[in-house]
Structures are given as structure tokens and as C-alpha cells.
Image: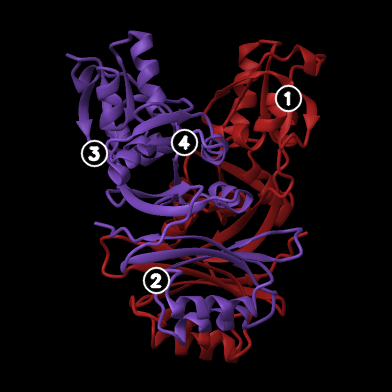
Chain colours: A red, B purple
């Protein structure tokens, strides 16, 4: 099985591929658009995309791409984001003068890096910063990236888990051209719009509450300049193949001008 | 009045200060923490913080800081994010070979920049990229930032509105040590948690629906490893000084283990 992901070799997305799908062949893509294209064209059987991070929130761009393509969510996994300080083999932490990485990774390790008294410089990619480190040949330089990125480029982990907040995880979704029938422990992801009237969301949620369907995510996103005002992202426990779920979605369709089922898939448990 | 904002002079946050508060004295801060500190210590009467972007979503870090500090939201404004391609005076767009900016700004202008056939390089700050441009003295270099940043550093706007998606706006909040009593057109922002049981959110929303209170935002954010599972961000139309609103929040308190009122303030209309 070939799986597309965004980023360079050693990206957290690639780690998520292995965590969810086992030892698969991975294909690095420059952008999220390229990941969707790789799956839609049949180049790859699966794509793996980040959909939300516990610190940074939902990745709206990937919801937009899910709405634009006719692909299905077929799996999910939660990856613990553990940043490593990576340098040349034989280098001690005290020798490091400057640290490079993606600004988000630098931001997530700000306190640790400040304590080290190093300068920081933003570069485009997390795993890519290890590639740049290697190319530079500079022994006073270090990068912030995953353990895997260090291994791929033959660099050394100077310190592991340097993120300031340990509650840092990213939820990834697997996408495919074919939908699947998940087993008993299933989750379903939908997107819908509502007319902007008081109580509209309350009515919409009643279709789940009255059937004791458990919501695991609800988020509204303002869409200015559109005919609808808000787009709602909802995840709930249950498979599309269950009668109760079908009835709930039929019922929701009475209130929602737009309703898209993005996929039904085995639920991952956040550990 | 002195107002703290995060970023360099010419940042979109500074533009939002002027849009909401008029010609005030602004104070540039390195981080969002510094903005909160400046207000909490009395150094500045107000702080201006971005809370959500229509493309990138909510800025959870600022919700966390609102929860950590005893400050009040006293105003809001929506700023249209209009990116400019900025170069040296006298330079033509065709001469530009490389463009620098914050990765998020580069990402929001990806299609425009690709069409220009230029290389891009990520730097830490949007307005800061114009400062770097000026320091470099390189006439083949350009930056992506606000119109104001170009003016501050005496650079030229080569092209305006180069963002790929015109529906790009950021909502900013003004924070203060003192709460205010807004007029008729008010909005209130609260944060709460719920026990993770089916229908919990439905019950919570009933306190608003049964009183015909209009929600303008609802978002849930997973908090792994905490005693509560989800944190809800809710904005609604109405002031804390109204009897109906007080009753609704009293009622909500019966379901919510944690309930924090972050502020009640005049509502801005998104244009």
C-alpha cells in the first residue's frame, strides 16, 4: 500500500502513517493539495492528513479539501508530538548556539530554548530543518524535529521531549477513494450548515441528543460573504451503517441546507 | 491611551488597534504573554489580541491566556487581512526573484507567488520581513506584509491583495483590567467545561435556546489528560447586565463544572 503525506521524510505525518497503517510505503508531498491529488488520481491508495492539534486547533484547509474532493475518511490516529533537539553526533547541548525549525515547533519549545540561551531561526519545515542542519556542516547549529528525522539524516538527539506543554498531540485522518464499513467501535465525521436563527444549533443537536448519540467534536467556523454564515464540524460515535445513525442524519437534513458525510471509520482511542 | 500588541511596528495587530480604538499610542510586544503582562501590570490601558482567523481558526493560546489572567474583554473588531507584495521603490514586479515573509502569509499567497515564479523563504514575522528587506538592500528581494508595514519602512507596494482567498479576516479582542457595561448591541464571551456524557452539550445549549439567545460562536476543544474532556468557547448576543442573560448563565452553572465569563462588550459587525 502506498500512502501520501505532506512534508519531508521524517515528518510527524509520516510517523502517523506508520502508527495507523503499519510498515507501508510512504510518498512525500509538498502540499496538502498534492496529498489529495495523489489519492484522487489513484497514485496512492491512502493519504494521511492532520486535522487538528491540541494546541493549534483544527486545520481548516484540510476540511476545505475534504469538501472539495470526493474522498472518504477511513481511519484516524492521535500522534503525540514529541520534539527533539537534534545536532551533529558527538556535539554536547552546551555547544549549541543557534536552533532552526518551523516557527510552530520553535514556538512550542520556546521556554526550553530560552533556558538553553540559544538563538532561533525559522525555516519552512520541521523535518527539513534536520536536512538543512546536515547540509550546513555547522556543529554549533541544532534543529527541532522528530526522533525519526534525526535517524533518517544520521544526526544525534541531544535532548528529547523539549516541548513546553506535554499535552501536544495531533489527530490525523486517513483518506481513500473507497468508503469502508467499520466495526462496532466506529466514529463518523460530518460537516453541515444551518440557517442563522436563534436555536438553530439546539435543534440540530437534538437529532443526536434524542437518540443518545455521543458527540466527540463540535466546532463552528464563520464563513463571511457566503449564503450560509457558519459551517459546523461534528464527529460522533457510531457507524453510518447503523439504523439510529441513518435516522439522525435524515432528521438533521431537515434543518441543514448543506450536509456532507465525510466518512465513517474505526475510532482511535486517545492514550 | 496606551495599547499593547504582539509583533513589530506595522503588524496587522497594530492596524487592528487603530481600527478599533482610533489614533492611540501603541506598544509592540514580542509575545502574546508580554501583551497580557503589559495590561495586567498597568503599563498599558488596553491590549489587542487576535482570537480567530477565518482561514486558520481559533488561537487557543490566547484563550489559555484569557483563562490564566484576570482581565476582561472590552471590545472586538474584524480586520480584513490584505497582503501586499512589497519591494524597494522603483523596482518592477518582474525583477523580483525571492519573496520573504511569515510562513502563514506565504501560504496564504501561495498561488499568486507561484504565478510570479519567485522563490520563497520563511522568516519569523510579517512586518519584520519588510524590516529585513530594507536592511538587505537587495533589489531582487520582496516581502509580504501589510500596507502599513510598507509605509513605515519607506518601501513600495508592488502589488496589493495578493492573498489567494479574499475571505481572509482576523477577529481581534481588546482586553483591559476593568470590565465595561456595553450598550444595546452587546456580545458576551464565555468558556465552560461539561461532563463527558451524551446530551451534555444539548442540555447546556438549552439554557440559551429556551431564552432565544443567539449564539455567534461555539467551538469545543479536547483537553487530554485533564479531569474535564472538553473546553467550550461560546459567544452570544446580549450583555451580562441583562436579566435574561444572567438567568441563562446561572442555569448553565448547574451543568458546567467550570464556567468563566471572559467579558461583555459592544458587538462589531463583520463587513
In this view, the residue in front, A230 or B218, is B218
- Mark 2 vs 3, N-terminal side: 3
Residue A103 position, x and y percent, is 55, 32
Q: Which residue is mark 4?
A: B44
The image quadrant where one finds the C terminus of chain A is bottom right
Chain ID of residue with mark 1: A
The tag earlier along the polypeptide, 4 or 3, is 4
User: Which chain letter matches label 3?
Assistant: B
**Visible residue check, residue A240:** no
SS at circle 2: loop
Label 4: which secondary element: loop
- Judge depth for marks 2 and 4 and give the one in front: 4
Label 4 neighbour load within 10 Å: few <14, some 14-19, many 20+ = many
Residue A144 screen position, x and y as percent = 67, 29
Q: Residue B107: give x, y in percent of width and height.
A: 41, 38
**Same chain, marks 1 and 2?**
no
Question: Which residue matches tag 3?
Answer: B161
User: Looking at the rendered structure, which numbered label has been put on residue B238?
Assistant: 2
Badge 2, how many Cα within 10 Å: few under 14, some, many 20+? many
Amino acid at each position: 500500500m502506498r500512502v501520501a503525506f505532506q512534508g519531508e521524510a521524517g515528518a510527524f505525518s509520516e510517523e502517523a502513517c506508520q502508527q495507523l497503517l503499519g510498515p507501508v510505503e510512504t510518498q512525500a508531498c509538498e502540499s496538502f493539495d498534492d496529498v489529495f491529488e495523489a489519492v484522487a488520481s489513484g497514485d496512492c491508495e491512502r493519504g494521511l492528513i492532520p486535522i487538528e492539534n491540541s494546541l493549534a486547533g483544527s486545520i481548516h484547509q484540510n476540511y476545505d479539501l475534504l469538501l472539495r474532493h470526493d474522498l472518504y475518511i477511513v481511519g484516524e490516529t492521535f500522534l503525540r508530538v514529541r520534539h527533539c533537539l537534534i545536532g551533529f553526533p558527538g556535539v554536547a547541548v552546551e555547544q549549541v548556539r543557534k536552533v532552526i525549525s518551523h516557527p510552530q515547533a520553535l514556538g512550542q519549545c520556546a521556554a526550553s530554548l530560552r533556558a538553553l540561551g540559544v538563538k532561533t531561526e525559522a525555516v519552512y519545515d520541521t523535518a527539513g530543518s534536520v536536512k538543512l542542519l546536515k547540509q550546513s556542516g555547522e556543529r554549533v547549529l541544532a534543529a527541532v524535529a522528530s526522533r525519526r528525522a534525526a535517524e533518517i539524516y544520521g544526526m544525534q538527539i541531544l535532548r528529547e521531549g523539549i516541548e513546553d506543554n506535554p499535552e501536544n498531540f495531533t489527530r490525523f485522518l486517513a483518506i481513500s477513494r473507497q468508503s469502508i464499513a467499520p466495526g462496532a467501535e466506529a466514529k463518523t465525521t460530518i460537516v453541515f450548515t444551518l440557517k442563522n436563527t436563534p436555536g438553530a444549533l439546539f435543534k440540530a443537536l437534538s437529532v443526536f441528543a434524542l437518540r443518545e448519540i455521543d458527540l466527540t467534536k463540535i466546532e463552528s467556523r464563520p464563513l463571511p460573504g457566503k449564503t450560509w454564515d457558519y459551517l459546523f464540524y461534528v464527529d460522533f460515535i457510531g457507524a453510518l451503517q447503523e439504523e439510529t445513525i441513518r435516522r439522525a442524519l435524515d432528521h438533521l437534513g431537515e434543518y441543514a441546507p448543506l450536509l456532507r458525510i465525510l466518512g465513517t471509520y474505526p475510532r482511535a482511542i486517545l492514550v
